[in-house]
Amino acid sequence: MLSRVLAVLAVLLATFIYRSGRLVKHGIFTLPALPPSYYVDGDVQTHCTILQESPHTFEYCEDMTFWDHLDADGTVAARFIIVGCDPNRKAWNTVMGPLRNPEPRAYLWLLDTVDNSLQRIGLEGYPEGHSFHPLGIEVTPSQNGAPSNFYVVNHAREKTTIEHFTISPDTPTQALWKRTLSSPWFVSPNALAITNETSFYVSNDHLMTRRLPFPLAPALPLTETIAGLPLSWLAHVTINPDGTITHELAALGVAFANGVAISPDGTTLALSSTSLGQVYFYDRNTATNALKFRETVNLPFFNDNIMFDEEGTLIVTGHPHFPSLTAVAANKTDARAPSWAVSLTPFQKKRVSPRAHAQRIGSETLFQSDGSVFGSSCTTLRDSRTGSLYMVGLYEEGLMVCRP
C-alpha cells in the first residue's frame, strides 16, 4: 500500500514539475533581474508619463479598454479609454484576497487619448447598496453617435456579477445602468471579450474561490493557483430579449483562465492561463462562437490581461515575480512588484503543422520594470494608429502612457 501511495505521489510531483516547473522556478523562487525601466521605443524618462489624479481615486486599476467613436463610414473619429480602478483592492480582492471590507465603491475613468485628460464616469441609476468592484471591462464601439453597450465584471459583496450599462458620446461621463447579470455559472468571472452588442466570452479564473468559508479558503484557491490545477473555464454568454441569459461552455480544463481577447478579424481567440504562464490560441467560428484549440505559447511571467491591436498582434501583460506581487498586496515594507509586457506577432497566418505554426509567432518585450518606475503591471493597450502604449498596475498609482 505504501509503495502505491508513493508511486501516485511521484506521478503527481512529476506532472507538476512538467507543467509548472519552468514558471515556478523563474517566477516564484527567482527574482528576475529586470532593469528599473525599459521601453521598446525609447528612453522611459522622455517617452513615458504617469497620469495621476486626486489621491485614492485613480489607482489600483485592473483593466481598461478602448472606446472608439466611429463616423458614418465606420472610421475611428475619436478614441477614448475606459479604466476600472479600485483603491480598496488591498481590502477586497476576491481573486488574491483578502475579503475584509467591500466598501467604498470603486471608480470608472475616461481618458482622452489626444490630450491625456481624465474624467470620472458616474453610474447613473446604479442600485443603492449594490457594491461595485470592477475587474474585466469591455465596451462596443459607438456607431455614428449611437450609445454603446458596456459590460463590467463586478466582484460585489455577495457574489460576482456582470453589470450591463450603456454609455453615449453625448454624455461620456455617465454610464447608464441597465441590469445586473447573474448565474450559477458565474463562479469567478474575470475578463470579457465582446462578440456583439448582447453577447460576450467571459473567463472564470477559479473553481475554488476566496469566497469559500474558512479553512477551505484561502487554502483551496491558493492550491488551485500554485499547483496549476486545470479547473477553470471560458464561457460564452448571450443576453436574450427577455433579459435572461444563455450560458455555453467554450473552453474547459484551463489553469487560472484570465485575460481573453478576439483578433480584429474575429477568427482567433486568445486566452491567458496565468498559473502556467501560457496563452492558448483557438480558431473561432464567427457564426456559432465555437472554439477549436490551435496552439500554446509560453511566457516568461504570470500573464494577466491580453489585447489584440489593430494589426493582429497580441499584447500580453503580467507579473514576473508572484511573491513580490503578494508582498505589495500585503503592504510589506519596501515591497515592489515588477512589470513586463510583450507582443506576440504571427509571421504568417497559414498553418502547416502545429510545430511549425508555433515557431512562427515572434515575441518582443515592450516594457519592463523592476517595480521602481511602474509596478504590478496587469493590462497594456497599444494604439496602432499612434504607436502609443498604455499600462495600468494592479497595485500601482495612476496610468502610464508611453509614446514613440
Image (tube, helix red, strand yellow):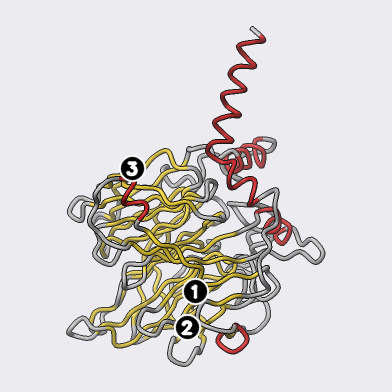
Viewer-proximal residue among 362 and 123 = 362
Give 310 or 195, whichever is nearer the viewer: 310
Q: Nearer the viewer, residue 264 or 197?
A: 264
Q: Nearer the viewer, residue 199 or 227?
A: 227
Asked if the residue under mark 1 is in contact with the one under mark 2, i.e. CB atoms within 8 Å, the reply is yes
Where is residue 100 shown, x and y percent of the image?
69, 54
The residue sitting at the bottom extreme is 115
Q: Residues within 10 Å of mark 3 (few under 14, many from 20)?
A: some
Residue designated by label 1: 83
| Residue 43, quarter of the rendered image | bottom right
Residue at 32% x, 57% y is 200
Structural crowding at the residue carrying mark 2, measured as other residues with C-alpha within 10 Å and reported as few (<14), some (14–19) or many (≥20): many
Q: Which residue is mark 2?
A: 111
- The answer to whether residue 104 is seen in the rendering is yes
374 in relation to 253, above or below: below
Going from N to C along the chain, the mark reached first, 3 or 2, is 2
**For residue 219, which quarter of the picture?**
top right
- Which residue is tagged 3? 249
**Any part of residue 132 in sight:** no
- Where does the N terminus fall, quadrant-wise? top right
Q: Amino acid at mark 2?
A: Leu
In the image, residue 394 lies at what x, y percent?
60, 65
Rendered image quadrant of residue 107: bottom right
The residue shown at (29%, 78%) is 142
**Mark 3 or 1, nearer chain start:** 1
**Percent x, y of residue 306:** 44, 62
Say above or below: 207 vs 43: above
